[in-house]
Image: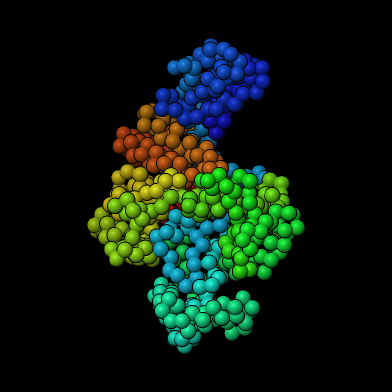
Amino acid sequence: MDLEKLLADRLAPAFAAVAGGPVDPTVRRSARADYQSDAALALARRIGRPPREIAAEVLDRAALGDLCAAEVSGPGFINLTVADAALGVAVAELAGDPRLGVPRVADPQTVVVDYSAPNVAKEMHVGHLRSTVIGDATARLLDWRGHRVVRANHLGDWGTPFGMLIEHLLDLREAEGADELSVGDLDSFYRAARAKFDADEDFRDRSRRRVVSLQAGDERTMRLWRLLVRRSESYFLEVYRRLDVTLTERDFQGESRYQPLLAGVVEELGRLGLLRDSDGAACVFPPSSVGRDGEPLPLIVRKRDGGYGYPATDLAALRHRTGELGATRLLYVVGLPQRRHFEMVFAVAGAAGWLPGAARPEHVGFGSVLGADGRMLRSRAGAPVKLADLLDEAVSRATELARDKNPELAPEEVAEVGRAVGIGAVKYADLSTDRNRDYVFDWDRMLSLDGNTAPYLQYAYARIRSLFRRAGVAGVAGADGVAAGPAAVPLADPAERALVLALLGFAPVVTEVERTLEFHQLAGHLHRVATAFSAFYERCPVLRAEGPVRDGRLLLCGLTARVLRQGLDVLGIRTPERM
């Protein structure tokens, strides 16, 4: 039972009768009642009547029956307080739903999620964290909702740097160079190649010639290039495994994949009359893109020297995704500094007719990860923090906390909890922040067992699992999946009522986050569920209760565990059974 929808359905005919046409009641959760409608305020401006008068007439006409009590408050809000009996039935129905009130979509889309996108022969650093974590949560959520999700890891695996990288590989002798790459120190390999390129004119000349050979498809050069790519991909996959990210080798879609398509992109743009010459470069000037001086900004699709840059590759990828894959939603999980670039790419794609029908591209932007000084997070040496090192420290700190918190855990359990809590803390700290904002990376805060943190939610889940083990009823009333429970839950305490309302709010939040991809809203709701459960657990005895009260409270415990587990799974965070 979706209470928000049910209440809106009851109010809608009354609003329509007052307005003389359809009105969205806009029912939402409220701090002043269980739910609230503010539709009378907007309607007042439309029909020229006082909002309180409209709200009162709506309530006179609405068939609310025994569903809820209602009153007009403030300038014209309608406050709705759901009857305990209706809440008890609604939460019992939710406990019997294996999908927790979140159905699979009736009209699934093909959605491309472009995320992570590290560069070959470079190690992943903290700057890759947000794209990888937000993108993976996006893919997980859309998967769960029933969409056909195409994960696209747009690797930087092509371009002029590969000339120097291949030449450096040859200088080391191929076998030794491959060994150096295999140990995972990609940054050292890249820095050494860069240093030689900057200092040695002969090496620079060889590197430039090697780029020409690469672009021409020279067999030996291509073999060495593939070696660099394979070794880098192996390293990336290990980072994804440790980060509990769902990207696999099948999802690598590097820039090289689109190289054969670039000339066709430019040719088609020219045929459509969209290209203009600008100092020898082939450009498109989207009318909506202007600089600070008011002059149009160019999207350079072919450079003056005949080479291609990111705009051409992004246009080719977009055209492939809509034309060949049939994608109708294209999500680019890339930092906010790239907003203008994507606005221009999307505008050009639209003008070229590469966004047919309902196809819509979206830039899912995000802010930066900062250190305590408010600047970009860096190591003590001033370099970007390697993602692998950050994950190591997260697991180490969480393992130590797990060992101190519960000395009775076996060593293998400590290791498992340490990994789940450490990785979960890093991911949750990111996802619980509005993605459009920067955030400060703070170990103490993100690993705390209090507050809006992953460990707090994981501990709430583990606490419920412990309660069910003590009760010897692991499969009762929704503790493990769906099991038989009462037809209605008796609500004898305000803390039970508050928990029920939080649990019933899970599905609407998931639906909204599917639209906005603002995962801090889901994280915040899970925290409200855990907080409501903590208050319930302190006030309402479960195992000492008897009869229907005990059964109802066990159902609430089991349902809370399921909501926390499912919500955290969408965020890509594990829920350990013990902590």
The N terminus, quarter of image? top right
Q: Percent position (x, y) of residue 388? A: 38, 66
Q: Nearer the viewer, residue 428 or 281?
A: 281
Q: Quadrant of residue 573?
A: bottom left
**Vertical placement of residue 31 versus 182, above or below:** above
Residue at point 31% right, 58% down? 398
Q: Nearer the viewer, residue 469 or 397?
A: 397
Residue 262 visible, this angle: yes
Q: Percent position (x, y) of residue 197? A: 45, 77
Question: Viewed as shown, does residue 337 lie left or right of 369?
Answer: right
Q: Percent position (x, y) of residue 497? A: 41, 30
Q: Residue furthest front?
A: 279
Q: By what rule are the colours in the image chosen?
A: rainbow
**Vertical placement of residue 37 versus 121, above or below:** above
Residue at point 55% right, 44% down? 294
Residue at point 34% right, 65% down? 383
Q: Residue furthest right?
A: 271
Q: Nearer the viewer, residue 394 or 292?
A: 292
The C terminus, quarter of image? bottom left
Residue at point 32% right, 50% down? 374
Q: Percent position (x, y) of residue 312? A: 62, 61
Residue 109 visible, this angle: no
**Vertical placement of residue 194 versus 533, above or below:** below
Number of marks present in the image shown: 0
Question: Viewed as shown, does residue 345 lie left or right of 462?
Answer: right
